[in-house]
Amino acid sequence: MLTGFEQQEPAQDDVFQLLQQMGIREPSFALHLLKGGWNNRVYRLVVGDFSFVLKAYFYSESDSRPRLAHEWAFLRYCHKRGINCVPQSLAILEPVLGLYSWIEGHAYGGPAAPVLASEIQTALSFIQELNQNSGNNFEFVPDNLPLASEFCGDLMAHVEHLERRMQRFIQMPKPTQMHQKVHQLVVSRLQPLWHLITDNLTRDSRKEPGILRPLDLNERCLSPSDFGFHNALKTATGPVFIDFEYAGWDDPAQLVCDFFSQFQVPVPAEAWSDFAGAVASWYPEPDWQLKRMSLLRSTHDLKWICIALNHFLHHDSHRRAFAAPAIAADSEQGLLQIQQQQYNKALLLIEKLETQLK
């Protein structure tokens, strides 16, 4: 079975096992590696006239997070709730292979596939369906739905999480000139932003009694995690959301901030007020929730700048090489090109955040 980043595709016997779970005995199939993923390897599995999505999840001794288990549990819950803007989970071979329904659609982004106001409303309705029942009360779900991968239970936990991300770049080895440029960028521009954001957050939190208290259980939300239109397909019937390997119970502020801070397919900033206000309104103290979202917004903007630079971290490079073996095997030039692109994205995001914080 494929269990490390060194193998190029799933074993034939493993694919047969997945198909047999669905009652398919077809002796032949074709696998086509799809482009675009940074964390896992995704294939179009063609069996006769039918297509499926086969995901091979990254798994290693140094990074053994149960990505498949998280995604599978989340999708099974979606199916129980009758939520249809997600793929169907069809078969599983733990710890790294999952089979899902094929979705006809294309990626969001650019003038050809903009994010529409109606699609933002669909995203909001999706989150509401996950978390509320018809009586407008939160419905607690079985214990097998875990905490989200980056769950933070209070305001300062978000700050500490970002600090750990920053430290990874400060302490990273610098084997190339690009790594040295990233280190200089972090020290000269990200760190000053970090200090300004934390100073502002500390100052503002002092004006809000109780804002630093931990979330109660009924103040958490069930989150797709890494939620946004960068993890969605535009279809004839509306957006279909994908990639739930980090899903679970989370802070509503993190869900909302990530939705607007992710840079791959930006959501219009003018949608913030309605979207954040709607999510906050589902909770016993909506003003408290909304204030936390506002306080953490810049923190998550800075977090996503760090995410843009993850290609320079050795730990993440193994996972990315697994997800895109053609790029990894191509040449150093291909990797340098991607790193330069990510560096340029980070520069633009830094300039935007510096302007916002002036």
Image (tube, rainbow, N blue to C red):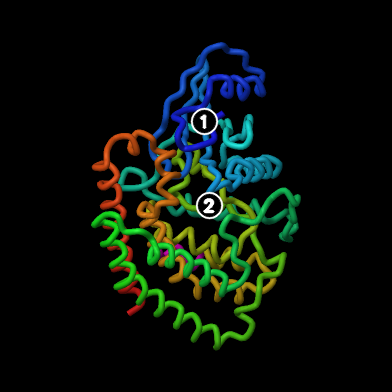
Q: In this view, does 119 lie to the left or right of 27?
A: left
User: Does residue 244 appear in this view?
Assistant: no
Examine the image and state in which quarter residue 107 appears: top left
Please state which amino acid type lies under the numbered disc 1: Val
Q: Mark 2 points at which residue?
A: 123
Quadrant (top left/top right/bottom left/bottom right) for the C terminus: bottom left
Which of the pair 5/32 is nearer the observer? 5
At a point 28% along the width and 63% down the height, the residue shown is 347
- Which secondary structure class fits the magenta region best? helix
Q: In this view, does 178 lie to the left or right of 159?
A: left
At a point 54% along the width and 48% down the height, the residue shown is 63
Q: Residues within 10 Å of mark 2 (few under 14, many from 20)?
A: many
Label number found at residue 142:
none
User: Is residue 273 found inside the magenta-colored segment of the image?
Assistant: yes
Label number found at residue 53:
1
User: Is residue 340 found inside the magenta-colored segment of the image?
Assistant: no
Q: In this view, does 172 lie to the left or right of 15?
A: left
Q: In this view, does 17 lie to the left or right of 106?
A: right
Which of the pair 56/279 is nearer the observer? 56
Please state which amino acid type lies under the numbered disc 2: Ala
The magenta segment is 269-274
